[in-house]
Amino acid sequence: MQPSLYYSVKGAKNIHDFDIADYVGGDPSVSQRYLELPVMGAARFVVSDNTSIVVSAGPYFAYGIGGQIKGQLYAANRSEDTKVDTFGGDRLNRFDTGVGLGIAAELSRLIIGIEGQLGFIKLVDHYNSRNLNFSVLVGMKF
């Protein structure tokens, strides 16, 4: 088991699959900041003396701690940039959970890999948008 605690930033630009026109217009962008707790189970396969392949999978749980929806607000023949809180009111759901998958190569002390997450919770209750995240991992073992 490999539990961790992450501070992660997710988001999207030019959102057209759910209506946030009540908040901002134009081509809005969304940023979401989460505290994330992935609980990954990992299997290590030794390839040679200094090389291993690690495959991991498991659930993650996240809590939204901030973010913004940015866009244009149009009024009286002019527009102005506007920002609203991502998780305020009835906007995006603050809680998220899903599954994470990853694969990494451990080359002596160097770690290189990729990881992905698929969210199960709808970002907005009446639309089918969910979090989807891919990461590239580069690290050192001490």
Image: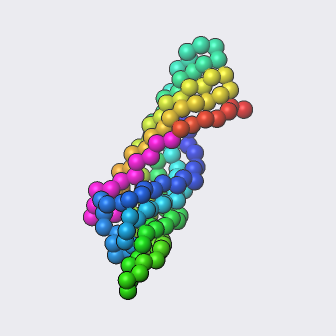
Identify the colour scheme used.
Answer: rainbow
* Quadrant the N terminus occupies: top right
Residue pictured at 60% horizontal, 19% vertical? 51
Q: Is the magenta stretch mostly helix, strand or loop?
A: loop
Residue placed farthest to the bottom in the image? 76
Q: In the figure, 45 relative to 70: above or below?
A: above
Residue placed farthest to the front in the image? 77
Residue pictured at 53% horizontal, 29% vertical? 104
Q: Where is residue 107 in the image (x, y as percent from the top left)?
A: 63, 22
Is residue 100 on the magenta stretch? no
Q: Where is residue 26 in the image (x, y as percent from the top left)?
A: 37, 68
Residue pictured at 38% horizontal, 86% vertical? 76
Residue 121 can be seen, yes or no? yes
Count all numbered tags in the image, as a single digit.
Answer: 0
Residue pictured at 47% horizontal, 74% vertical? 82
* Quadrant the C terminus occupies: top right
Residue 90 can be seen, yes or no? no
Residue placed farthest to the top in the image? 48
Q: Where is residue 90 in the image (x, y as percent from the top left)?
A: 37, 72
Is residue 125 on the magenta stretch? yes
Q: Nearer the viewer, residue 16 or 18?
A: 16
Q: Give the range drawn in magenta.
A: 123-135
Q: Where is residue 30 in the image (x, y as percent from the top left)?
A: 44, 62
